[in-house]
Every structure is written in C-alpha cells, then in structure tokens.
Amino acid sequence: MDGFEPSVRTDVGRLERALVHEPGEELSSVVDPDAWGWRGLPRRKRAAKEHARLVGILESNGVTVHELGEVDPDLAESMFVRDVGFALEGGFVVGNMHEEIRRGEGMRLTARAVELDVPIYHTVHGHGRFEVGNVVWLDAETVAVGRSMTTNAEGIRQVRSVLDTYGVELLEVPIFGSTESTGQTHLALVFGMVAPGLALVYPQAVPTEFRNLLEDRGIETIDVPRREQRNVVTSSIVLAPEHVLLPGGNPTTRSALEERGLEVTEIDIREIRKARGGLKGLVLPLERSDDPRG
C-alpha cells in the first residue's frame, strides 16, 4: 500500500485520491425497496457497470482510487461511501448513521482506514447522528452542514468540536427534503459547490436565510429546475478546477455551467439512482488540492 496523508478542505480543488465501493451482492439483500425508501430494485450488474464507468472517469482524470472492499451482506447502501465519513488534515471523522440498517457502514469504514494506516480523529457516538452527505465545503475555512433527521444537533456539536481544532467554521443549515419532504435528505442532494464562488442549488429545499448567507459571501447560485432535481443534479463531483462530473440527462444545468466556462462530463447512473442516492455520495474524497485552481 502506498502511503498517503488524507487532506480535504474544499469541494472544488483537484480530486487526487478517493475511496469507492462497487455495488455487489449486498444489493440482493433488499427485497422490498419501499422499506428502504428506494424507487425500485437496482439490478446489480447494471449498477456495477455504471459504477465501473465512474471509476474509469476518475482514473482517466488522474484520481487514485481505493476500494472499500467486502462489506456485510446486509449493508445494501454501502456504495454511498461519502455518507459515512470525511477526511480532514491527515485523518478521518466517522459519522453515525440515522437508519439502523446503515449503522454497520461506520465500522466498515473504520476497518478500511486501519488498513490504509489512516487515524480516526473522532467517531460520532451516543445520541449523535451525523451523515456526511450533509457536509458541503464552502471554502477552506467554512463547512455548511445540513440539519435534518439524518444529522441532529448532538452530532453537529461533536463534529463542530473537531472542526474547531482545525480552524474550520461550521454553518448549520436546516433543510426540508428534496423533491419529496421526507426529512431524511442530505444537504449535498440539494446544494453543491461546483467552482470557487459558484454553486448549484434546488431552491425549494434550502432556507432563504442560507441563500442570503451565500450571497453575502459572494457565492453565485444556479437554481436547478425541479425536473432535473429528480435526477439529483445538484449532487455533482468536481474532478478538477472548472471540470464538473454531472449526472446525465440535465441539459438546463449543463448549459448553465458551460455558459460560465466550466467543462462538463456526464455519466448515466439511472440504475444506481433507484437507491435514492446522488452521484456525489459514490465518492469519498481522500485528497483534494487545497488550491481550488489545482
């Protein structure tokens, strides 16, 4: 194993190293998709092909990709690795999943961190709930964290204490769901940075106060239409400065990004999306350039 020190303080710097999990037999453990809040049952082979295309795009853009490895057969949402933890200044912070059916994912990430010789700085525990799908870096000193059913006040308190150590401000953002107000959404499903000072947002799902805060900080927002938010278009991945990986089938959002000079690559994840996750959730950044220009 090549030694490395994880370091992420931006969502828009060049992605250099990432952790992923290819969807496998664990998908077969789901018999009733409604019980999981899914839109259907992803076909494993098709989901795996979509995931392989994602890995291919990452590697062709110079990203070193690590696999999570074998998971418990009941952890059907393990492909959404970003929900579980985040890298910061040489170590990991591991969250605490809201749904009982996802609780083992934190233990699996911890075991993989040990294999990679990466220390665990903190694991959210007790009554705290914290899912990293709620974390969006606004800049190197500021993180927005969505508070909903999946991330509660105690979880935010614990993570804030860690971030304070590194001089990172945590901004709490109450969120109200995406296209259906279930209370279980993630901030990254409705808001995401795509370049320094530029973000995608689904306006119906974030409070006006947060929009005003973004404006005060000089962050321009592109409102995505509801029909494209059904594709979770806000959940995009910045591969490199001015290069965004976008879920396929979102021409309005793609045009808005290209009009601002960004390169856009599209990927079809319609099979994976049956599990109601977004593209961003499939990639846990381990290293990003601190300089958003790469």
Image (tube, helix red, strand yellow):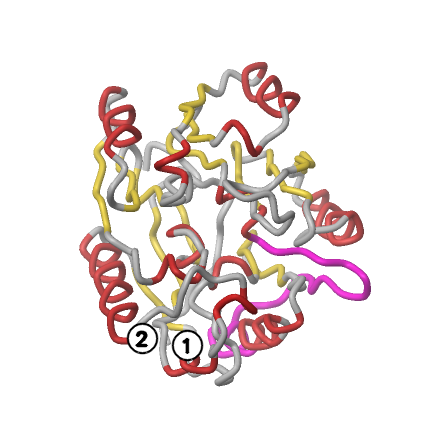
Label 1 close to label 2 by CB (< 8 Å): yes
Q: CA distance from mark 1 to mark 2?
A: 7 Å
User: On the picture, is 170 further left or further right than 283?
Assistant: right
Badge 1 crowding class, 10 Å Cα cut-off, few under 14, some 14 to 19, many 20 or more, is many
Q: Quadrant of residue 206?
A: top right
Residue 106 forms part of the magenta stretch: no
Q: Position of residue 199 (x, y in %)?
A: 43, 29
| Residue for point 40% across, 35% down | 291
Q: Position of residue 272 (x, y in %)?
A: 35, 62
The secondary element bearing badge 2 is classed as helix
Q: Amino acid at mark 1?
A: Leu
Q: Quadrant of the C terminus?
A: top left
Q: Quadrant of the N terminus?
A: bottom left
Point out the stretch of residues depicted in magenta: 111-132
Q: Amino acid at mark 2?
A: Arg
Give the residue pinned by disc 1.
27
Q: Nearer the viewer, residue 54 or 226?
A: 226
Badge 2 crowding class, 10 Å Cα cut-off, few under 14, some 14 to 19, many 20 or more, is some
Mark 1 vs mark 2: which is more N-terminal?
1
| Residue for point 56% across, 69% down | 35
| Residue for point 31% across, 72% down | 43
Q: Position of residue 177 (x, y in %)?
A: 58, 42
| Residue for point 25% across, 45% down | 248
User: On the picture, is 41 further left or further right than 114?
Assistant: left
Q: Nearer the viewer, residue 164 or 204?
A: 204
Q: Which mark is drawn over residue 44?
A: 2
Q: Nearer the viewer, residue 64 or 265?
A: 265
Count the marks: 2
Q: Position of residue 256 (x, y in %)?
A: 28, 24
Q: Which mark is drawn over residue 98?
A: none
The secondary element bearing badge 1 is classed as helix
